[in-house]
């Protein structure tokens, strides 16, 4: 990846993280931990990978994204706003009763949202339907579906994985946000889904393991996904929950807790400092 492109993606990812903090702080609720861990992946998808146009949000040939881990909507909203689907100022209205940005994504209210999600495990099934529909209609758009590593403890995920492998949906790409934490603790403490790679492979998937915060590895993984024919691809992205905000990193307590005023100020100051370090 060219250094200029990588630098811009890093800067955009910081802006996505600032949007996550801004939204959850103003809402006094939400899920910052998992939103921060998936921020780099969401940045790459919307600013390098996906064929989407905020001026044509319903274009039939657009790529689709189904945020199966719907509680990390703050990351999706920040990326959509920065891409131009709606004003960035609306981030501050997260979860307000009259806002288009509710706690989980809604295709009814939010421009750029392709599927309403929130019930964990269901998003990948919807993504499979979209990918199969593209095949049946002879369309070449791709479907991307971020999943939580805790979410893949849901049985419906594996029914969908079996279906996708059997139907050879090579236009489908799942991304497992592997931060090893969920609401009550580590994956092993709650209900281990391990081994992740081998399980997807058993269902007929191509699997790529990467660091989910390295844009060079992220790029290589998505290129490998597009090059793979006859199989859906799962990118297992090792991440850090709360990435980018020191006191949130690798803490399950921040799965569903919003920062207070003091924590908001510290988080934004850290992100501003991270941005300055890229401008030297």
Image (cartoon, grey):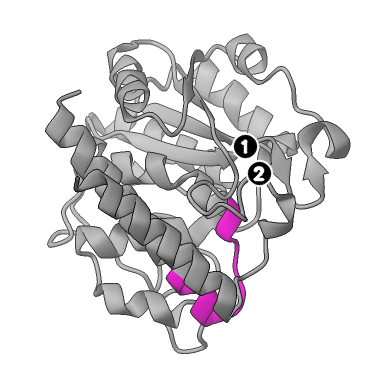
Q: What secondary structure is found at the residue carrying circle 2?
A: loop
Q: Residue at x 39, y 37 (%)?
A: 144
Query: Magenta part of the protein: which range?
Result: 22-33
Image point (25%, 71%), residue name: 86
Return the residue nearer the eye: 185 or 222.
185
Residue 162's spot in the image, x, y percent?
Answer: 61, 22
Disc sitting over residue 179 in the figure: 1
- Check the image and name the residue furthest to the front: 280
Residue 66 showing in the rendered view: yes
The image position of residue 159, as x and y in percent, is 66, 30
The image position of residue 151, as x and y in percent, is: 67, 42
- Residue beneath disc 2: 250
Which of disc 1 and disc 2 is earlier in sequence? 1
Tag 2 near tag 1, CB within 8 Å: yes
Q: Comparing marks 2 and 1, which lies closer to the viewer?
A: 2
Label 1 residue SS: loop
């Amino acid at each position: 990846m060219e250094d200029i492109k990588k630098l811009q993606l890093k800067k955009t990812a910081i802006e996505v993280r600032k949007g996550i903090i801004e939204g959850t702080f103003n809402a006094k609720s939400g899920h910052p931990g998992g939103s921060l861990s998936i921020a780099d992946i969401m940045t790459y998808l919307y600013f390098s990978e996906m064929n989407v146009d905020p001026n044509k949000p319903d274009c039939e040939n657009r790529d689709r994204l189904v945020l199966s881990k719907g509680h990390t909507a703050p990351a999706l909203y920040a990326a959509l706003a920065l891409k131009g689907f709606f004003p960035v100022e609306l981030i501050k209205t997260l979860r307000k009763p009259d806002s288009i940005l509710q706690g989980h994504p809604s295709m009814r209210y939010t421009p750029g949202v392709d599927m309403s999600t929130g019930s964990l495990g269901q998003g990948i099934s919807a993504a499979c339907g979209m990918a199969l529909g593209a095949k049946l209609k002879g369309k070449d758009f791709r479907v991307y579906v971020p999943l939580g590593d805790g979410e893949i403890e849901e049985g419906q995920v594996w029914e969908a994985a079996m279906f996708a492998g059997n139907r050879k949906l090579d236009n489908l790409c799942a991304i497992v946000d592997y931060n090893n934490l969920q609401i009550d603790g580590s994956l092993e403490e709650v209900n281990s889904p391990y081994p992740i790679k081998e399980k997807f492979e058993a269902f007929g998937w191509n699997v790529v393991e990467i660091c989910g915060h390295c844009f060079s590895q992220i790029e290589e993984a998505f290129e490998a996904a597009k090059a793979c024919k006859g199989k859906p691809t799962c990118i297992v992205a090792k991440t850090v929950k709360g990435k980018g905000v020191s006191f949130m990193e690798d803490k399950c307590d921040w799965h569903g807790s919003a920062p207070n005023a003091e924590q908001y100020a510290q988080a934004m100051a850290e992100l501003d400092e991270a941005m300055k370090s890229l401008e030297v």
